[in-house]
């Protein structure tokens, strides 16, 4: 990837947070300028359970994750989703899913969910893992400061 024109697919990790809304906006701004496709990717998984424990009422995680994905896209773009934006819902843990998805991407964009103060200077576990292990460049987007 020697030139910007080589960027064809940008994947954005989406989890419903304000940081992921901002990541979608920034990712789309880049994708739009580069003529690239943007994939808003959300993941879901069943919660871990102990051996021998049968969890009752554990279902529809995929449905709720799909709703969160659509709500986040709507927050970023309103009701008119740009034509170069696709959504993808994948079963798996965010860290592994995003790193695997980075194999087919030219760039990965993730939000940083800082907690303000000293903690706000640190990357979250998912964004840190993506920076360390992704197979493409990673852009970590901060949530805009509220004034």
Image (spheres, grey):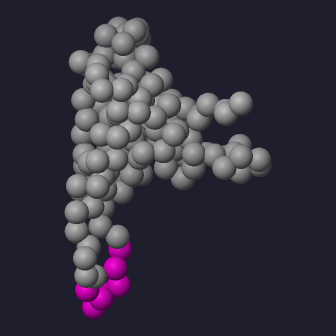
61 lies above or below 26: below
Which residue is located at x 36 percent, y 13 percent?
32
**Image check: 18 left or right of 7?**
right
Q: How many marks?
A: 0
Which residue is located at x 54 percent, y 53 percent?
125
**Image check: 136 left or right of 119?**
left
127 lies above or below 10: below
Q: Residue 64 lies in magenta, yes or no?
A: no
93 lies above or below 17: below
Q: Position of residue 61 (x, y in %)?
A: 27, 61
**Image check: 143 left or right of 59?**
right
Which residue is located at x 30 percent, y 52 percent?
65
The residues colored magenta run 48-54
What is the chief secondary structure element of the magenta stretch? loop
In front: 121, or 74? Answer: 74
Q: Position of residue 42 (x, y in %)?
A: 33, 45
């Amino acid at each position: 990837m020697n030139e910007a024109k080589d960027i064809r697919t940008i994947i954005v990790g989406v989890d419903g947070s304000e940081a992921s809304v901002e990541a979608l906006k920034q990712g789309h701004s880049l994708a739009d300028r580069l003529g690239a496709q943007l994939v808003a990717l959300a993941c879901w998984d069943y919660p871990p359970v102990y051996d021998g424990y049968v969890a009752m009422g554990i279902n529809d995680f995929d449905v709720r994750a799909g709703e969160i994905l659509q709500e986040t896209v709507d927050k970023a773009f309103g009701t008119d989703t740009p034509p170069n934006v696709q959504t993808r819902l994948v079963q798996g843990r965010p860290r592994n899913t995003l790193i695997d998805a980075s194999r087919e991407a030219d760039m990965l964009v993730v939000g940083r969910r800082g907690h303000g103060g000293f903690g706000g200077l640190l990357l979250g576990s998912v964004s840190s893992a993506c920076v360390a292990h992704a197979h493409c460049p990673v852009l970590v987007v901060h949530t805009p400061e509220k004034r």
